[in-house]
Image (cartoon, helix red, strand yellow):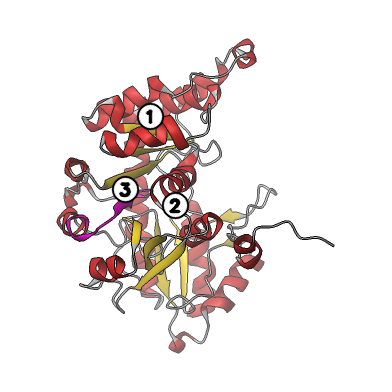
């Protein structure tokens, strides 16, 4: 049988997504979705969709949503591109700024889609291993430059640990890199306000992109909506050259705008996630499952040998009990579980179940 795949695609491994059971009973703490409902204003926008409008193509560049995003961040429309989820934003950055045969830079472990997208593109991956305490090595930029990285993706807060880099460190990395730095802020809505984290000043640089998503903070993971912020010199070629035509459908533009504008509702959910994150981390810590300080909507717990269990066995036990968490059979992570912060009831079910095994 003939094989028509490109050699790089034939040789690569695809992305492994988290389980998405459809039974309505499983407690899903495995894919970092927001546990709280979508805004009622977003629901109203969906209810008010005029289906006759679906006969024609949507507004090509989602300008109403771009304008709302630009106003929120204190920038101009030309500094924003709306994308079909954060993953499309990553793919667009790669196809715009990395040559075929070029290099994508990343710290590892990190979001496992980064190398998949690079492999599809025919690009090399330059990986710099995190320190044992999950911090970035001081020679990060030098190592990425030596490897020829044309685009570097850093997720902040970090996945899968939830650790937050301050903006000064990001500024220093951007200044030292030869290529573009994409700061993937998929989880930034859950950062503790007292940290005063603000990455917007990075946009004064000509080599920084910031990625945001509606999947986490706005409870719209099922809609696939995100955006990139950056200087016009980086945004314009994406908007005018590499972006798919009509990449944001009419429904997503309307519902996304309504959810984005209902900021007070979204902020209430973010605060509830932060409160539950603290409670969950403390409760699991008392069971011997320690975790680094997370500023995301998940925690990464360590399963020590003294617990009498392994991360893999706890993952299997919880799954049998109808609770999904994420286990990664990967370097630095084989004794860890990543647990999404759920509702109080979901978190209680997890804690109660683990208490039966670990005490």
Q: What secondary structure is marked by label 2?
A: helix
Residue 186 on the magenta span: yes
Q: Earlier in the sequence, mark 3 or mark 1?
A: 3
What label sits on residue 102 in the rendered view? none
Q: Earlier in the sequence, mark 1 or mark 2?
A: 1
Q: Please indicate, yes or no, whether residue 159 appears anywhere in the rendered image.
A: yes
Q: How far apart are the alpha carbons under marks 2 and 3?
A: 21 Å
Q: Locate residue 331, reporting x and y percent.
A: 46, 78
Q: Locate residue 57, reporting x and y percent.
A: 57, 18
Residue nearest the viewer, comparing 356 with 249? 249
Look at the image and give the residue range highlighted in magenta.
174-189
Residue nearest the viewer, comparing 228 with 243? 243
Q: Quadrant of residue 315?
A: bottom right
Residue nearest the viewer, comparing 3 with 302? 3
The residue that label 3 is drawn on is 188
Label 2: how many Cα within 10 Å (few below 14, some 14–19, many 20+):
some
Tell whether 149 sits left or right of 7: left
Q: What secondary structure is marked by label 3?
A: helix
Tell whether 113 sits left or right of 74: right
Q: With respect to residue 336, does 227 lie above or below?
A: above
Q: Residue furthest right?
A: 1
Q: Nearer the viewer, mark 2 or mark 3?
A: 3
The residue that label 2 is drawn on is 344
Q: What secondary structure is marked by label 1?
A: helix
Q: Are marks 3 and 1 in contact (CB under 8 Å)?
A: no
> For the point 28% across and 33% down, which residue is it?
232
Q: With respect to residue 141, does 89 lie above or below?
A: above
Label 1: how many Cα within 10 Å (few below 14, some 14–19, many 20+):
many
What label sits on residue 260 in the rendered view? 1
Q: Quadrant of residue 7?
A: bottom right
């Amino acid at each position: 049988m003939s094989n028509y795949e490109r050699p790089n695609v034939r040789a690569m491994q695809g992305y492994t997504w988290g389980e998405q059971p459809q039974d309505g009973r499983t407690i899903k703490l495995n894919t970092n979705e927001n546990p709280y409902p979508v805004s009622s204003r977003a629901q109203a926008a969906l209810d008010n969709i005029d289906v006759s409008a679906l006969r024609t193509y949507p507004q090509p560049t989602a300008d109403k949503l771009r304008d709302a995003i630009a106003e929120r961040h204190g920038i101009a429309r030309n500094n924003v591109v709306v994308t079909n989820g954060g993953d499309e934003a990553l793919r667009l950055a790669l196809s715009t700024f990395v040559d075929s045969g070029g290099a994508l830079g990343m710290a590892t472990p990190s979001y496992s889609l980064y190398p998949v997208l690079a492999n599809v593109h025919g690009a090399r991956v330059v990986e710099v291993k995190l320190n044992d305490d999950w911090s970035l090595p001081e020679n990060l930029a030098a190592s990425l430059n030596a490897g020829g990285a044309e685009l570097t993706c850093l997720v902040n807060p970090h996945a899968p640990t939830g650790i937050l880099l301050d903006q000064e460190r990001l500024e220093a990395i951007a200044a030292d890199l030869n290529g573009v730095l994409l700061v993937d802020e998929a989880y930034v809505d859950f950062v503790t306000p007292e940290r005063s984290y603000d990455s917007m000043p990075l946009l004064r640089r000509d080599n920084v992109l910031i990625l945001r998503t509606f999947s986490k903070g706005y409870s719209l993971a099922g809609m696939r909506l995100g955006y990139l912020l950056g200087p016009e010199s980086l945004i314009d070629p994406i908007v005018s050259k590499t972006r798919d035509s009509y990449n944001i459908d009419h429904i997503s533009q309307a519902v996304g705008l309504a959810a984005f504008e209902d900021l007070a509702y979204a902020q209430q959910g973010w605060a509830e996630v932060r409160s539950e994150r603290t409670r969950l981390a403390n409760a699991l810590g008392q069971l011997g499952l320690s975790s680094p300080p997370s500023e995301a909507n998940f925690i990464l717990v360590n399963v020590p040998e003294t617990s009498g269990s392994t991360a893999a066995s706890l993952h299997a036990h919880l799954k049998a009990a109808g609770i999904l968490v994420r286990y990664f059979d990967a370097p630095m992570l084989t004794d860890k579980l990543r647990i999404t912060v759920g509702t109080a009831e979901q978190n209680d079910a997890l804690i109660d179940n683990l208490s039966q095994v670990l005490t």
